[in-house]
Image (spheres, rainbow, N blue to C red):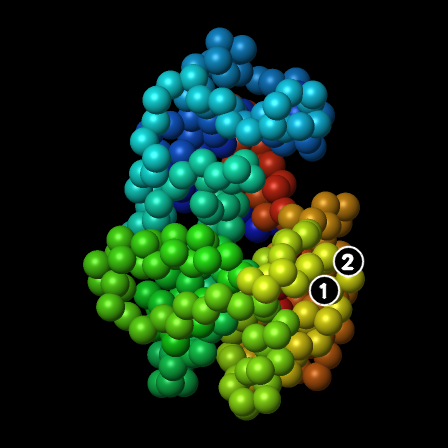
Amino acid sequence: MEIKIFCSKEWLDYELLDTGEGEKLERFGPYTFVRPYENAVWKKTLPEAEWKKADGKFWSSKVGAKAGWKMEKKITEKWEMEYKGIKFFASPTPFRHLGFFPEQASHWDFIEQRIKSAEARLRQKVRFLNLFGYTGVASLFALRAGAEVTHLDASKQSLNWAKENQKLNAELAEAPMRIIEDDAIKFLERESKRGNKYDAIIMDPPKFGRGPKGEVWKIEEMLPKLLSAVQKVLSDKPLFVILTSYAIDSSSLPLGYALEEMMKGFEGTIEAGELCVLEKSNDRIIPLANTAVWEV
């Protein structure tokens, strides 16, 4: 297993402007926001005056303030963002996120490149499954590459957002993409019984959540069961599997070991590491999540 830093340096609509003292200053299109980043145990580089220009700030309950967004200026409810020609909406959510995770851009690049290459080589459609798919940006890159996409999430609100994102991209608006509201493990168990298989799978399981029928998800209890269920829907010759976690923040190695165990019946390589973004203020690489990638 190799250790790698996953970092895209090709963003135009997003910038990590500065970090420090438990916070990060970011630009999302026309707006700048301050959000918590507890791992920033260093001083801020930019002067405080630059931070105070932010359009809004998300307060964490950990600092004793009322949790949630406080907007200093009026912003639109949602606005368009773009990465390498794929468009999607951004909007502040109650969970500090804005509808996508900029640090995952390197995975979007990988997904599109690997699917295009495989379809050109094999001359057949790649079946792509996005578990815990959220608002669907990764699914759109797979769809543009030509894959048959199944996008699953337990949140109806996230799925509606994913549908809006698809419509935002005219060339993909009518492309067939299965969008399913379901509990991930129950869906995988049914797919296994149906004999449905996938060549490429990406999953970003949450630390805690509830399925559409109130099913409780706790990553430390459910991840082994999830990976076992995923293993049963892999095709005979899978292309890649991506596992990302914001819940396991100590190291990427546990994800790598878990993926290694799941894929031990297949020949391939595993890279584990951190999803990062480049900080504009001093050119540092800032880690934001752990991930592991298996590919043939």
Q: Nearer the viewer, residue 268 or 36?
A: 36
Please state which of residues 214 and 65 is positioned toward the viewer in this rendering: 214
Looking at the image, residue 235 lies above or below residue 186: below
- Cβ–Cβ below 8 Å for labels 1 and 2? yes
Distance in Å between CA atoms under marks 1 and 2: 6 Å
Q: Exactly how many numbered labels are in the figure?
A: 2
Is residue 278 visible in the rendered structure shown here?
yes
Which image quarter holds the N terminus? bottom right
In the image, residue 127 lies at what x, y percent?
45, 78
Judging from the image, what secondary structure is the residue with disc 1 in?
Answer: helix
x 63%, y 72%: residue? 185
Q: Amino acid at mark 1?
A: Leu
Q: Residue at x 27, y 57 (%)?
A: 167
- Examine the rendering and report whether any part of residue 141 can be seen: no
Please tell me which residue lies in front, 134 or 148: 134
Residue appearing at x 55%, y 82% in the figure = 191
For disc 1, the neighbor class at 10 Å (few under 14, some 14 to 19, many from 20) is some
Q: Would you identify the image quadrant in which residue 193 lies? A: bottom right
Give me the residue at 45% from left, 45% from top: 99
Q: Is residue 169 left or right of residue 293?
A: left
Q: What mark, if any, has residue 223 been given in the picture?
A: 1
**Label 2 sits on residue:** 220
**In terms of image quadrants, where is residue 75?**
top left
Left or right of 169? Residue 32 is: right
Q: Which mark is residue 85?
A: none
Q: Position of residue 158 (x, y in %)?
A: 45, 54
Query: Looking at the rendering, in which quadrant would you find the C terminus?
Result: bottom right
Q: Secondary structure at mark 2?
A: helix
Q: Residues within 10 Å of mark 2 (few under 14, many from 20)?
A: few
**Residue with the most extreme front position:** 213
